[in-house]
Amino acid sequence: KTARTPLMAGNWKMNLNHQEAVVLVQKLAWTLADKKHDYAKVEVVVVPPFTDLRSVQTLVDGDRLAVKYAAQDVSTQDSGAYTGEISAGMLAKLGCSYVVVGHSERREYHAETDEVVNAKAHKALAAGMTPIVCVGEGLEVRQAGEHVPYTLAQVDGSLAGFTPEQVADLVVAYEPVWAIGTGEVATPDDAQEVCAAIRSRIAETHGEAAAAGVRVLYGGSVKAANVGGIMTKADVDGCLVGGASLQVDEFGGICRFY
Ligand code: PEP
């Protein structure tokens, strides 16, 4: 676990305009600077809407802030007649380090399949960014006790066609849908169970080196008050945070869980 730098990614979803984005990122950076946050110990990533990325880029460039930023989605296409889509090349040009693909809200409201998520992950990687590939079961699957096989099938589909070397540098986010935005956080043991299963599956499909390198995040109602317990788990390498990432004190506390 020590070789894998913990990653805290704050998914703003469809919140904050570009001016509000500047305020939040500045406050976050100041808070972390105040506490002498060591970015080598925990990588900090914000995930704003597309329309905020240019402003965040300017800020991070200008202030040499160590906060990184990501996009919430990417097109499966490179360019052309795809009205409303944003390509991986455009996001790379804006300095995005990561791209979230397959968030449960995209899977649910835009019917994204593992095949689509996989195509998006390939586009992100080909453009030099790291995909954060989201997987996780809904409540009914959890209640039926099928959460591990269900999630592993998503992992298989979403990671198809990547080499072991590529998988070693990817990020997978386990986000049980019943825990997203509900305030109902998974227990540390629940998070560990599935994150460990994901790593074992990757060991089978892509080898031990890929499994040792890939970072597996937990997501679902993470807050400053519960992050510590989750991060003690051996196979949890960080968190994908939604609601709490909009509050500086909460997200700052999450980033400084150590
Ligand atoms: C998310 O959207 O990825 C998420 C985990 O949301 P929340 O933290 O609000 O549950």
Image: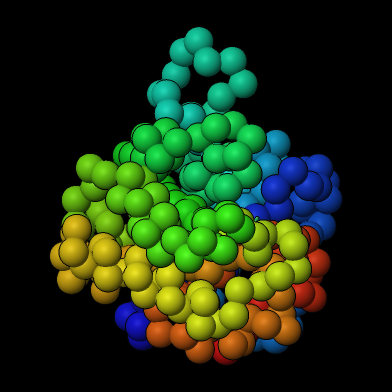
Q: Give the residue at the far front of this rendering.
A: 144
Left or right of residue 132, residue 167 in this image? left
Q: Where is residue 101 in the image (x, y as percent from the top left)?
A: 49, 45
Viewer-side residue, 154 vs 36: 154
Residue 166 vertical position relative to residue 210 in the rendered view, above or below: above
Q: Where is residue 180 in the image (x, y as percent from the top left)?
A: 67, 59
Q: Say which residue appears at 70% left-offset and 48% top-offset.
A: 13
User: Looking at the rendering, in which quadrant would you find the N terminus?
Assistant: bottom left
Viewer-side residue, 240 vs 66: 240
> Ligand 1, what quadrant?
bottom right
Q: Position of residue 216 (x, y in %)?
A: 42, 68
Viewer-side residue, 162 vs 79: 162
Left or right of residue 197, residue 258 in this image? right
Left or right of residue 110, residue 173 in this image? left
What colouring does the structure picture have?
A: rainbow
Quarter-wise, where is residue 73 in the image? top right
Residue 81 vertical position relative to residue 199 in the rendered view, above or below: above
User: Looking at the rendering, in which quadrant would you find the C terminus?
Assistant: bottom right
Q: Say which residue appears at 73% left-offset and 59% top-offset.
A: 181
Residue 19 vertical position relative to residue 144 in the rendered view, above or below: above
Q: Say which residue appears at 55% left-offset and 40% top-offset.
A: 107
Q: Taking the image as drawn, is residue 180 in sight?
A: yes
Viewer-side residue, 117 vs 142: 142
Residue 179 vertical position relative to residue 107 in the rendered view, above or below: below
Quarter-wise, where is residue 252 in the image? bottom right
Quarter-wise, where is residue 109 in the image? top right
Q: Position of residue 135 (x, y in %)?
A: 47, 54
